Image (cartoon, rainbow, N blue to C red):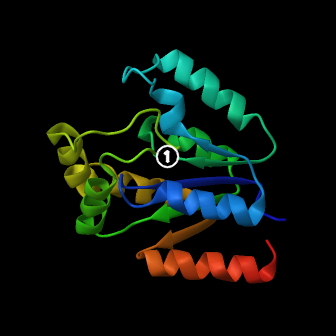
Amino acid sequence: MENKRIMVIGSPGAGKSTFCYKLKEITGLPLYHLDMIYHKADKTTVSKQEFDRALDNILAENQWIIDGNYQRTIEKRLRLCDTVFLLDYPLELCLSSIESRVGKKRSDMPWVETEFDEEFRQSVVDFPKSQLPSIYNMLEKVKDKKVVIFKSRKQADDYLQEMKKMGK
């Protein structure tokens, strides 16, 4: 298996976690959700130092899939990964996906979201302008990594189906 250290990034609501579950099923690699590291069940968060310590422990492993943006740590993860998947989907799709998961238990989040709060909504709306350009900028500088950018869920699903056929 060639991909041993994989990071999956993209807008909230793009379906990173769902993509990661399918990728884990195909590859057998351990999966880590950054939201589960950062957020506590009581809706508080860990300190920056605690988060970084937990992330560094994961990055020290030989194999992983890491799900999540956490822009501050993208460059660190980029240095150590061999493959990056960017889910660059339309804003409307991301917003409707988040709305549809409100009230549902998820294994990538330590609590059930009871509302789509306005601050989070605004961060998703701002994502294409506030974070995506710097993500593309970082990815353009990466020459020794496999970078795969999906513009639709169908592209991502087709890619995963192909991986499954190839036995990866």
Question: Quadrant of the rendered structure where residue 168 is?
Answer: bottom right
Residue 80 in the image, given as x and y percentages of width and height: 69, 45
The answer to whether residue 124 is left or right of residue 25 is left
Q: Is residue 152 above or below residue 81?
A: below
Q: Name the residue under label 1.
A: 68
Q: Which residue lies furthest to the left in this view?
A: 118
Identity of the residue drawn at 48% across and 53% down: 138
Say if 54 sits above or below 85 in the image. above
Q: Give percent across and percent down for residue 25.
A: 71, 62
How many discs mark residues in the rendered view?
Answer: 1
Residue at position x 69%, y 34% in the image: 58
Position in image of residue 64 (x %, y %) = 72, 47
In terms of image quadrants, where is residue 144? Answer: bottom right
Q: Is mark 1 on a helix, strand or loop?
A: loop
| Amino acid type, callout 1 | Gly
Q: In this view, does 36 lie above or below 142?
A: above
Answer whether residue 120 is visible to the viewer in this image.
yes
Q: Which residue is drawn at 25% across and 59% down?
A: 95
Q: How crowded is mark 1: few (under 14 residues within 10 Å), some or many (20 or more)?
A: many
Residue 37 falls in which quadrant of the image? top right
